[in-house]
Image (cartoon, rainbow, N blue to C red):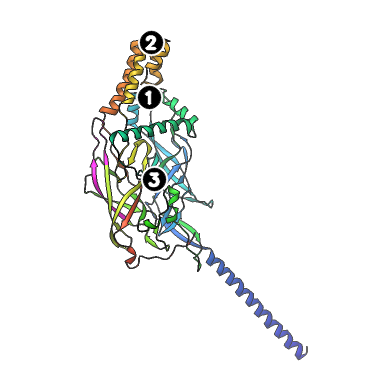
Amino acid sequence: MSANDYKFRKHSLVRGRGTACTLACACLLSLLSGLARGQTASIQVPAAAPLSVQLLRHVPMETGAALEGHLLYPVYVENWIAIPAGAILRGRVTHLDSDRSRRIHSRLRGDFTPFHVPVVRFDQLVLPDGNIEPIASDTTKAGVPILRLSPPPGRKKGSFLSRQIDAEKQRVKDAVSLFTAPGRGDRLVQFIYTQLPYHPERIEAGTAWTVELAKPLDLNLKHSPPEAGNDPPVQQGEQATKEGQDAPGPEQRNEWRLRAYLQQTISSANRKPGDTFEALVSEPVFDASKAVVVPQGSVLIGEITQTKRARSFGRQGKLRFRFRELKLPSGFSQPVEGTLTGVDSSKSANLQIDSEGGIGPRPQNRVVLPLVLTFLAGRAFDDDGSQVAHSAIASNGFGIVGRVVGIVSSSRNVAAGIGLYGAALAFYDLWLARGHDVVFVKNTRIEVTTTPARSPLSAPGLKEKPLASH
């Protein structure tokens, strides 16, 4: 080999190695760039974190029945969405407790079904990407179909007569919706069931539980860091319309809409004015520049301002409270003026929020039902038409058993007696029985609109960087 050939091969080898190094560096930079764009962060949802789960479909009332529901509200950890709303949770009915009060109430009306309250536990979380995470949650039995309450927008109190007329119009609309809203066939079947002396039980679709994690939950979140010149993603403030609220306008920029969970049970039965309670903020609040002004984990301090215990003769309980202080996780505290603008309540509680944030049962027409049942009971003594038809119409108040007895007995007095028994029960329920207290159990979700006395951004260390997407 000549000296020139040796120099040429040596130069080619060095150049090849340089090219290989260049390609390796390029691949490494590409890999690092990809990792930077799709980082995986580990986050831990702490124990006792509340999960609001709503049942997707009807389930038989039996031990071991499988449950599947969706998460009503997102779960935040350190101002990140750890579990998005809509994630699926799966669990089972662990056992059944007897519902004694409902049993007594129903048996007096001819329904001898042994009513139960399901005790449930959720043990699986299905994330939107399909990943299934095992979870450990506490058992709970406080499951009810919930209704989102909010005060009437700008409605004046008006006179007593006008309020009664408005209430009656609303009741008529509710009655009409039973026959026009979707699912009327199922509602008809359930109504027929209530007239039977015994019928199968089920857990209704829409029943919601708020369960707490028994153990911390470790999750891996994929997110990208914010790029220069791009706005950070919207995670809370602009999502208000999803819960039926209007996006805040320019005149509302100094108001914060806080979503929180009550940390204690509050009730008109045992609370008195001046008592305080706490609510844990579950979602961060951002300002116009996408900086965190109220971090998730802040604590609202509330104060009971007015209570009225439920009493006999149908006198209902009432409850009014306000929020006076906001404590941030950093330890900074400031006074606020907070008004209740939303709360999750059981549909059966039949509550309402007035324009000033007070909570009480909806007004009931306590005259119409007893009068109607008394009038129908008198039909047993009509001489025109079919006596069988008159007996069937008159014998209200004891379900289908009462109607059968009223018809078979061929006695006007028996049919009228059954009808008057039903009228007496309605009169007792509306006029003599003790009213209902206003009760919000621990982990009830509330929404509060607050006006800060001064901006917490002036406190050191509170302004945070924009949140990255997931």
Q: Earlier in the sequence, mark 3 or mark 1?
A: 1
Could you tell me which secondary element the residue under label 1 belongs to?
loop
Q: Which segment is the magenta one?
A: 299-318
Q: Residue type at mark 3?
A: Thr
Could you tell me which secondary element the residue under label 3 belongs to?
strand
Q: Earlier in the sequence, mark 2 or mark 1?
A: 1
Image-based side of 204 in relation to 264, left or right:
right
Q: For this rendering, which residue is in front, 130 or 277?
A: 277
Looking at the image, residue 77 lies above or below residue 12: above
Figure quadrant of residue 438: top left
Q: Residue type at mark 2?
A: Ser
Furthest-right residue in this view:
1
* Contact check, label 2 and label 3, Cβ < 8 Å: no
Looking at the image, residue 159 lies above or below residue 432: below
From mark 2 to mark 1, how far is it between C-alphas?
22 Å
The x and y percentages for residue 63 are 43, 36
The x and y percentages for residue 234 are 46, 58
Q: Which residue is mark 3?
A: 210
The x and y percentages for residue 450 are 32, 54
